[in-house]
Image (tube, grey):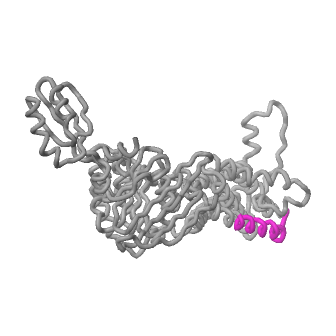
């Protein structure tokens, strides 16, 4: 059995893969539904005599609602799932089994990274495509090129998130520590230097919001070149730093 | 403190290639020295028993040889690449959602994908878990995990097996199931086997290193240790009072000590075994003793170990 098959079995038998996909698909269903029926939902909840005027939904609202959930709960789900699998030395004796048999730590790290980056991006893409379909059915169509580009850029962002989890796992050992550290690495720059005028457009978080902005026609493909290059560069740097750190770590 | 270095090992006095040579190896955890200048030589074909109480540094030494920990200081020379070694930790664990067959197949593929897949089933049967090979190992007992660990270790056909307390937490039947496959490695590959259960080491190993407080205080063949360290001892059980027999024994030049271990029972330490064999009957006859039983205590690793470490 190869390392690839090991990771694919881990995804299936620990329900990490199906679980992550269900989370994003759920958001893909709920997002456009919420956008289409927000007025009815608020009416049903009761507004205490206050009249709330909700403008008629436009197709971009469906994707914006999906994105709102995927950026928050989806991000947490990706970090939690990846941290559980990428804590290489969380259980010392399992770590010894693999470390004393693989030809290089890079092989172990990169295989596991590729599988979890891939499944995170795929789960996100599945949710996006479902949200796109439901938006079309309930509210109206969206330009395919913009939806697909936004979906691709979001996938690049989630691959970056998983790379940060790998880096965090090289710095700390347990799954919980890895999760909190990765969350900090991903979120803190976005809510600090990302708020400084213009800087945010260079950061990975810019890609996370691209699906909403592109489908609302607020931005174009060219607006994401810088942040894509920075995101890919940071992901590669994180992996390059993590491999020797994990290689040197004693078990 | 100079950093630890690793180099190729040489050749033993008997011409066999040396697979592991450690010289002055130290390992510090903060202020505590887990290894404090360890010297070890393991030649090809040895079944080397690393003996010592818990905390004496056995696990640390095996981990350093396997490369999962690094020495703080000293020299470690290896006569083979680490890819030809296999380490079995004292409490082997595997992903609980993998079957036993998948665990061993993964080990086979990682070590050498050209090893035939049929070998996986063979080593599982050899290790005594052939009937459970398609069960997920999350439900395995401690003994089954140990045997699965042995199978996952042997499937890669390593030249050097590093086994850390492989049977120490098992019941007698479980110990037997783990020790038998290890004993069968004699003459096929080199084994370093650590344990604090001396009977296991005496049964399986031909060479031993005794560790105490991070140092190796004896290294050599088991035979030499038992002959050289263990003082021959006789036990004499008498019916009635033992005082006259005791006085007779104390007059004999080959007796170095007489101890009353229980009413009517004497323990004799002797300096000369043939003289004792000839003189015991005469001394007892002179004392007019009624003899129930006379027996010589066999030299045991446990006794030698206690004499060395006390």
Relative to residue B154, is residue B215 depicted above or below? Answer: above
- Quadrant position of the C terminus of chain B in the picture: top left
* Count of picture labels: 0
Q: Which residue is at 56% across, 58% downward?
A: B71
What is the x, y in percent for residue A108?
Answer: 55, 65
Q: Is residue A176 magenta?
A: no
In the depicted structure, whether residue B308 falls above or below residue B150: above
- Locate residue B56, reporting x and y percent: 46, 47
Secondary structure that dominates the magenta span: helix
Magenta stretch encompasses residue A219: yes
The stretch of residues the image draws in magenta is A218-237
| Quadrant assignment, res B155 | bottom left
Q: Nearer the viewer, residue A206 or A30?
A: A206
What residue occupies the far bottom of the structure in this picture? Answer: B114
Q: Nearer the viewer, residue B177 or A231?
A: B177
Q: Is residue A20 left or right of residue A139?
A: left
**Residue B33 screen position, x and y as percent:** 56, 48
- Res B226 seen here: yes
Image position, residue B64 (x, y; %) = 51, 59
**x 83%, y 40%: residue:** A52
The answer, for residue A26, to whether it is visible in the render is no
Q: Quadrant of residue A53?
A: top right
- For the view shown, which residue lies furthest in the right direction? A197
């Amino acid at each position: 059995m190869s390392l690839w098959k090991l990771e694919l079995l881990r995804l299936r038998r620990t329900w990490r893969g199906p679980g992550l996909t269900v989370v994003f698909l759920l958001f893909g269903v709920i997002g456009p539904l919420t956008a289409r029926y927000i007025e009815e939902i608020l009416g049903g909840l009761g507004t205490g005599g206050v009249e709330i005027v909700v403008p008629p939904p436009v197709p971009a609202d469906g994707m914006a609602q999906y994105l709102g959930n995927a950026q928050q709960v989806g991000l947490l789900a990706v970090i939690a799932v990846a941290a559980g699998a990428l804590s290489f030395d969380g259980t010392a004796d399992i770590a010894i089994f693999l470390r004393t048999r693989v030809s290089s730590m890079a092989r172990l790290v990169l295989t596991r990274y590729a599988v979890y980056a891939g499944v995170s991006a795929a789960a996100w893409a599945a949710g996006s495509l479902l949200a796109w379909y439901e938006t079309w059915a309930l509210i109206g169509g969206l330009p395919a090129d913009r939806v697909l580009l936004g979906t691709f850029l979001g996938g690049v962002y989630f691959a970056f998130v998983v790379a940060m989890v790998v880096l965090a796992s090289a710095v700390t050992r347990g799954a919980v520590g890895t999760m909190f550290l990765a969350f900090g690495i991903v979120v803190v720059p976005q809510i600090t230097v990302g708020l400084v005028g213009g800087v945010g457009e260079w950061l990975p978080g810019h890609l996370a919001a691209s699906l909403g902005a592109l489908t609302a026609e607020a931005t174009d493909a060219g607006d994401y070149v810088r942040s894509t290059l920075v995101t890919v560069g940071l992901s590669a740097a994180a992996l390059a730093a993590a491999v020797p750190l994990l290689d040197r770590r004693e078990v | 403190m100079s950093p630890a270095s690793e180099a190729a090992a040489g050749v033993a006095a008997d011409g066999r290639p040396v697979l592991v040579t450690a010289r002055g190896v130290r390992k510090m955890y903060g202020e505590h020295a887990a290894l404090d200048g360890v010297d070890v030589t393991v030649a090809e074909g040895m079944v080397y028993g690393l003996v010592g109480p818990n905390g004496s540094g056995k696990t640390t030494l095996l981990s350093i040889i396997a490369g999962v920990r690094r020495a703080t200081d000293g020299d470690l020379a290896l006569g083979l690449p680490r890819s030809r070694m296999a380490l079995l930790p004292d409490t082997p664990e595997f992903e609980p959602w993998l079957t036993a067959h998948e665990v061993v197949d993964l080990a086979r593929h990682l070590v050498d994908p050209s090893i035939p897949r049929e070998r996986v089933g063979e080593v599982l049967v050899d290790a005594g878990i052939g009937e459970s090979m398609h069960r997920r190992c999350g439900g395995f007992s401690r003994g089954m995990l140990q045997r699965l660990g042995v199978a996952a270790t042997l499937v890669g056909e390593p030249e050097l097996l590093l086994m850390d307390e492989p049977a120490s937490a098992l019941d007698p039947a479980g110990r037997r199931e783990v020790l038998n496959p290890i004993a069968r490695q004699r003459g096929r590959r080199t084994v370093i086997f650590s344990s604090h259960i001396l009977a296991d080491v005496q049964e399986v190993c031909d060479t031993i290193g005794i560790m105490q407080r991070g140092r190796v205080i004896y290294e050599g063949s088991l035979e030499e240790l038992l002959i050289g360290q263990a003082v021959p001892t006789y036990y004499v059980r008498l019916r009635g009072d033992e005082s006259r027999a005791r006085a007779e024994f104390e007059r004999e030049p080959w007796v170095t000590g007489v101890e009353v271990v229980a009413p009517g029972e004497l323990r004799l330490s002797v300096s000369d075994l043939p003289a004792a064999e000839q003189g015991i009957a005469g001394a007892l006859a002179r004392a007019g003793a009624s003899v129930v039983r006379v027996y010589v205590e066999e030299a045991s690793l446990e006794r030698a170990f206690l004499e060395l470490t006390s």
